[in-house]
Image (cartoon, helix red, strand yellow):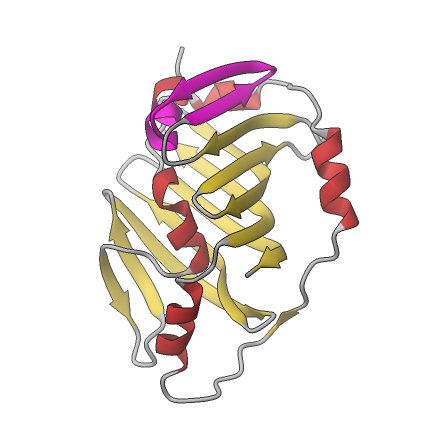
Amino acid sequence: MKSIKKLMLPLTVSAFALLLAACQSPIEQKEISFASDNYWTLMQDKLKTVKNLNLKGRIGIQNPQGRMSANYIYNLKNDAYTLELISSLGSQIGKLTADKNEAKLIINGKVYTSNDGESLIKEIYGLSLPVNDLKDIMLGIPQGMALKDSSGKYQSAVIAGFLVEYQKFADFNNYALPTDYQISNEDTLLKVRLNEVLTIN
């Protein structure tokens, strides 16, 4: 049965990936210092050029089928990305890899494929999630119908039927990234917390 409960199955430990991540030192998180009146306009232009990204954090998912939380590792290299969910005990819940041509989801050693990550998550888990737009959402430069505050910072956006709402931003090596935000539609609520930035350029 397609349900969020499938995410909670005890799965294999991604020990090698965790070891590599542990060897990298996270970029220091600082409060944002506004250097100019057009800070956010310049920052958003800068973020649009990012090709490499390695983030670690925490995600919570709630829908009528239940709720769960997990640690996440997100890696972006050019047009390809990997999203890995890891339980609090260190076991791998699932690993999604995708590029322009194909998406693969690995669960307990079994590989599922589709044309894109969004349709694959829907097919396997029965969850509608805007994974195809994760890069822009995580960088705080969402596409679609967006609302900015008086300084030009994104407050919210509607993407593929989801409402993205940003609560906090912080500076990571002169890149302003959202650290707390939520993604929701009428059935699903995701709460995302960014804990570490290992790579951004």
Q: Position of residue 111 (x, y in %)?
A: 51, 16
Q: Quadrant of the C terminus?
A: bottom right
Q: Which region of the structure is painted magenta?
A: 103-122
Q: Answer with left or right where residue 198 lies relative to residue 157.
A: right
Q: Answer with left or right where residue 199 lies relative to residue 52.
A: right
- Residue 137, compared with residue 74, is above or below; it is below
- Residue 4, compared with residue 151, is above or below; it is above
Q: Position of residue 190 (x, y in %)?
A: 42, 43
Q: Which residue does the image show at 71% across and 44% down from the upper left?
A: 21
Q: Nearer the viewer, residue 150 or 84?
A: 84
Q: Nearer the viewer, residue 132 or 99?
A: 99
114 in the magenta segment: yes
Q: Quadrant of the N terminus?
A: top left
Q: Position of residue 195 (x, y in %)?
A: 62, 55
Q: Which residue does the image show at 54% across and 69% down from the upper left?
A: 170
Q: Position of residue 70 (x, y in %)?
A: 58, 37
Q: Answer with left or right where residue 161 lies relative to residue 10.
A: left
- Residue 56, compared with residue 127, is above or below; it is below
* Quarter of the view holding residue 118: top left
- Residue 56, compared with residue 39, is above or below; it is above
